[in-house]
């Protein structure tokens, strides 16, 4: 009976864990180039995806961002503000292409010039190839790559939150390369205080 009560007491008392924002790859260092996966390592649906994505290192940015937390939770979301700045990725890649860097510079300029409490939500997306789990991971890594890039341009990372949708929110419904290249993207959502 004593052992049972001790086990119950131990199960009822938990330790408090500190929450963290999604981690920035490379600890906030410069973006690292990635290479396409070997086509012979394909996964379901005929995709040629890397079954061992690179690990994401920790940056230990606390989730308790003080004044920004309520903005992310209840703020007004504007998906149109940065629609023209949507960035696109190569197949199975998280590398920010040179052709997309000016879009991130535009987003960074807005946040550096804007002293208000505006925040940014980065939504990582993939094409339909690959497993759901893999696509969610790849979408997350794409959003984190953009967050890291913006942080390196001087945007306070506490003002940026990331989310992954994997392949669940395609911009184009087709099942060909034309549609897929539009679905491999990061969308930027401006979040403003109510």
Image (tube, helix red, strand yellow):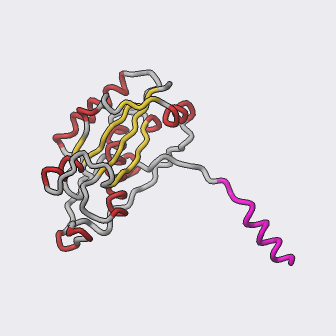
Which one is in front, 88 or 16? 88
Location of residue 102 by image quarter: top left
The x, y position of residue 25, in whole percent, is 37, 52
Query: Where 177 sits versus 119, above or below?
Result: below
Which one is in front, 176 or 34? 176
Q: Residue furthest right?
A: 2
Which range of residues does the magenta coloring cover? 1-16
Name the residue: 26% across, 66% down. 50
The x, y position of residue 185, in whole percent, is 26, 46
The x, y position of residue 10, in whole percent, is 75, 66
Location of residue 149 by image quarter: top left
Residue 169 appears left or right of 35: right
Total numbered badges shown on the rendered structure: 0
Name the residue: 49% across, 26% down. 193
Does the magenta stretch mainly form a helix, a strand or a loop?
helix
The x, y position of residue 184, in whole percent, is 24, 50
Assign the N terminus to one quadrant of the image. bottom right
Which one is in front, 132 or 82? 132
Say if the magenta span includes residue 13. yes
Location of residue 8 by image quarter: bottom right
Name the residue: 36% across, 35% down. 189
Say if the magenta span includes residue 47. no
Residue 127 appears left or right of 16: left
Query: Where 170 sits versus 81, above or below?
Result: below
């Amino acid at each position: 009976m004593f052992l049972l009560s001790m086990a119950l007491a131990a199960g009822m008392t938990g330790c408090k864990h500190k929450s963290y924002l999604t981690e920035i790859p490379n600890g906030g260092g410069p973006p690292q180039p990635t290479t396409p996966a070997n086509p012979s390592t394909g996964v379901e649906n005929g995709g040629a995806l890397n079954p061992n994505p690179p690990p994401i290192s920790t940056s230990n940015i606390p989730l308790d961002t003080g004044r920004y937390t309520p903005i992310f939770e209840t703020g007004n979301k504007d998906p149109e503000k940065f629609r023209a700045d949507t960035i696109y990725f190569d197949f199975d890649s998280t590398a920010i292409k040179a052709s997309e860097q000016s879009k991130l510079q535009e987003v960074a300029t807005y946040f550096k010039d804007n002293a208000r409490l505006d925040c940014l939500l980065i939504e990582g997306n993939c094409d339909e190839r690959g497993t759901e789990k893999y696509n969610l991971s790849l979408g997350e890594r794409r959003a984190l790559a953009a967050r890291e890039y913006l942080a390196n341009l001087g945007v306070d990372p506490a003002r940026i939150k990331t989310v992954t949708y994997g392949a669940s929110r395609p911009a184009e419904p087709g099942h060909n390369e034309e549609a897929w290249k539009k679905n491999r993207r990061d969308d930027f959502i401006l979040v403003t205080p109510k």
